[in-house]
Amino acid sequence: MEYRITFSGQGEFLIISPRILNTLIEKIHNSGKLELSIQVGDIMSESYREYILNVINSNREDSYFCFSNIPENPITMKQLYQITEEQMKNLDIGKEKCFERIRLLEKKGKLLEINCSEVFWIACQDSESVFLYQYANGMEEKIVIEVEKNRGV
């Protein structure tokens, strides 16, 4: 089955890439749980975080990179984690939210506590699911779950 993933936020630079979403979906699939905790570094590499931080700070004067809820300029890695949390809260599957709750626990090493919506969780558990990540310009990219061979053994 195909599921469309969209971002319901307002005209800002998206840091949640298809690769990050793919890693997140696979972690949810492999955990088999509605609720899980994930280190930000497990879904977003350090080099990607540093690159995105550089891109945002180099373009803060552009409204696309302003992130109105974060007035600091330049932003720090802490604010990048906050943007990640906020953008994940705005991910939708069809007309429903992907997550019922997401909370960033900075004292535990940039840990995201995630409660999946039932619809998103069921889609993540189906090895046959295909997710269509839809960009703001209408372009789409397919995300397919890669199943661990030893899962359930």
Image: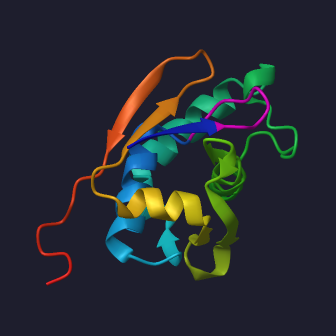
Q: Quadrant of residue 5?
A: top right
Q: What percent of the width, then of the height, locates residue 145? A: 29, 51
Q: What percent of the width, then of the height, locates residue 18? A: 43, 38
Instruction: Identify the residue shown where x is 76% and y is 26%.
Output: 11
Quarter in which the C terminus is drawn: bottom left
Q: Quadrant of residue 66?
A: top right
Q: What percent of the width, then of the height, locates residue 105? A: 66, 76
Q: What percent of the width, then of the height, locates residue 98? A: 61, 55
Front-most of residues 73 and 89: 89
Q: Judge whether 139 appears above or below 149 on screen.
A: above
Q: Which residues are magenta?
A: 7-15
The residue lying furthest to the front in this view is 1
Quarter in which the N terminus is drawn: top left
Q: Main secondary structure of the magenta part?
A: loop
The answer, for residue 117, to whether it is visible in the render is yes
The answer, for residue 61, to whether it is visible in the render is no
Front-most of residues 43 and 59: 43
Q: Judge whether 122 appears above or below 55 on screen.
A: below
Check if residue 12 falls in the magenta segment. Answer: yes
